[in-house]
Image (cartoon, rainbow, N blue to C red):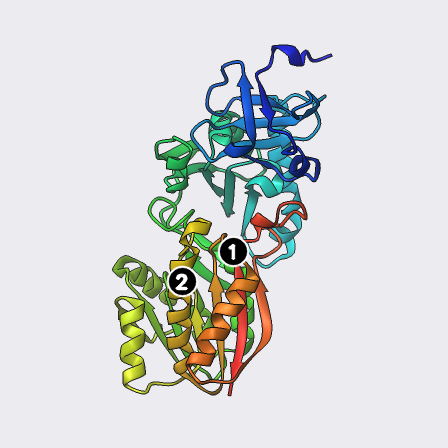
Amino acid sequence: MFDVSATPSLWLRPGRERSLQRRHPWVFSGGVARVEGSPAPGATVLVRADDGTALGWAAYSPESQIRARMWSFDPASPITAEFVTLRVHEAAARRAELLQHGNTNSARLVFSEADGVPGLVADRYGDTVVCQFTSAGADAWREVIADAIASLPGVASVYERSDAEVREREGLAPRVGLLRGNAPDPNLVAHEQGLQFAVDVADGHKTGFYLDQRNARTAIAAIAAGKRVLNVFSYTGAFSVIAASQGAASVTSIDSSGPALATAARNAQLNGVELGEVIEGDAFTVLRGLRDRAKQYDLVLLDPPKLANTDRQLERASRAYKDLNLLATKLLAPGGTLMTWSCSGAMTMDLFQKVVAGAALDAKREARIVGRLHQPSDHPVPLAFPEAEYLKGLVLEAE
């Protein structure tokens, strides 16, 4: 029998156990009464209610507002290397069907708390897996996790891209480099819907490609034929390439990053299509210029970067989302379609819809929601953890 008395404990304030009893995996700093023992950052602690009831095991993070992230709600099962390895392998197994029959070689193998491995993101592109360790707990098990991923069938390379700003809030320094196996292929590509997209493992955004927009790419492919398409925040041009491959009448891509647009041109070449018009510049400025020139498009794709990391940033982010959607709506031809997204976790779907509705009202356009877009199945959302649903998208039809 495992002796819990020798393990550091985190005691909750009265009433703060309720969220854990509902299986929400976060303990915020304001809910902590005291910590017994001297746990190091990332160490496993036993979480207790104020009456001493053991609630489960969590990774301790003394510098984060999220003071502990739950590994398990079973106090009788300690967190070991075998436990962590099994969690990684179970998560990967849940993606097997997608990788075998989903017309793609790429998937998110592990999605952090949603897969019971708090703070770990692991994305697979063919034989290469790119990891982000975004919490102290995941970082503490880094070597075990790397071994677990490297042992998966067909994996030849495990690369780390732990350079996201969120690590600073955990008191962690950035880390980038090879973890296991061979160096990633510099010509690595993600296959999807019969198309190829370059994956920049070392220097691209996040892990090199936006796997979370798989559903969006499918939706765009279904309606792009014959359309004049405007792709705002186009990044490496996946939306643009798909639109062109499906017979769009024209495609215009806007992004502020020259290297990203260069990769977009490479993606077009990989798939034998013309990228169309490319505009390097600030999206707000370019959109205002297009508006002033009375340009019109049949399909506008608006996928900005994250604008709100916390609730305190929501007001500013809402203004930015409204400005962007106002400009985009004004550029829609009668009967045109706007696909618009927010990837800000702090922005709920309800609030996002209100912001977009306000933009359409100010643009003096009648618009209706004809579809909603969400992150795909390899980015699951536990019922007890709605924060995992960070990607919200609306499909609007304007008169």
Amino acid type for the residue under numbered disc 1:
Asp
The residue closer to the viewer here, 50 or 220, is 50
197 vs 89: above or below: below
Q: Which mark is residue 304?
A: 2
Q: Can you give x and y, in whole percent of width and height, for residue 29 in the image? A: 50, 32
Local packing at callout 1 (Cα closer than 10 Å; few below 14, some 14-19, many 20+) is some
Q: Quadrant of residue 254?
A: bottom left
Q: Answer with left or right where residue 281 lies relative to residue 70.
A: left
Residue at x-position 56% and y-position 75%: 222
Q: Which of 286 and 8 is in front in this view?
A: 8
Residue 131, given in percent of the width and then of the height, sits at: 46, 39
Query: Tag 2's secondary structure?
Result: loop
User: Which callout, 1 or 2, points at the residue further toward the start of the chain?
Assistant: 1
The circle on residue 212 is 1
Which of 397 and 276 lies nearest the eye of the viewer?
A: 397
User: Residue 138: image x %, image y %?
Assistant: 50, 31
- The structure residue drawn at horizontal position 63% and vertical position 47%, both measured from the top left corner, is 95
Q: Which residue lies furthest to the front in this view?
A: 14
Residue 336 visible, this angle: yes
Graded by Cα atoms within 10 Å as few (under 14), some (14 to 19) or many (20 or more), the crowding at tag 2 reads many
Name the foreground residue: 308 vs 106.
308
Please identify the quadrant where the N terminus is shown: top right
